[in-house]
Amino acid sequence: MKLSDHIKPISYLKAHAAEVIRNLSVQREPMVITQNGEAKAVIQDVKSYEQTQETMALLKILALGTRQIEEGKVQPADDAVERLRNRSKKR
């Protein structure tokens, strides 16, 4: 994706909103909106946004896991499984 092909002034968005929305859904690539020559916003279709949010959530989980490993806050899998089995037996 070449970002420079997807930069439009806000006046273009105002004049072609329906077309822009339709193209976002088909192309699945974000568009940068400028105001007074400066990038001010990025718009994208909902599916791409949801996918981005899911990816960010996974990355946060990975980062948390990495930090916990670095801090030594881990235990062997066998110990964790055994603890869960014991917990379910008590119920």
Image: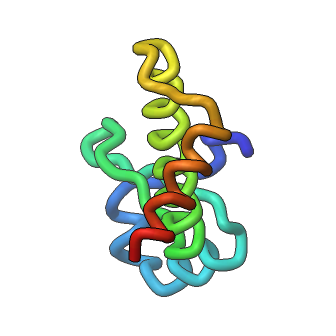
Identity of the residue drawn at 45% across and 40% down: 60
Residue 75 in picture, x, y percent from top left: 53, 29
Residue sitting farthest toward the left = 36
- Residue nearest the observer in this picture, 7 or 85: 85
The N terminus is located in which quarter? top right
Occupied quadrant, residue 27: bottom right
Identity of the residue drawn at 59% across and 49% down: 82
32 w.r.t. 75: above or below:
below
30 w.r.t. 17: above or below:
above
3 w.r.t. 68: above or below:
below
- For the image, the number of numbered tags is 0
- Residue nearest the observer in this picture, 44 or 21: 44
- Residue 14 lies left or right of residue 52; in this view the side is left
Identity of the residue drawn at 45% across and 15% down: 72
- Residue nearest the observer in this picture, 30 or 49: 49
| Coloring basis for residues | rainbow
- Residue 25 lies left or right of residue 91; in this view the side is right
The C terminus is located in which quarter? bottom left
Residue 35 in picture, x, y percent from top left: 27, 47
16 w.r.t. 39: above or below:
below
Identity of the residue drawn at 47% across and 54% down: 8
- Residue nearest the observer in this picture, 16 or 31: 31
- Residue 84 lies left or right of residue 39; in this view the side is right
Residue sitting farthest toward the front = 90
- Residue 12 lies left or right of residue 14; in this view the side is right
Residue 43 in picture, x, y percent from top left: 43, 61
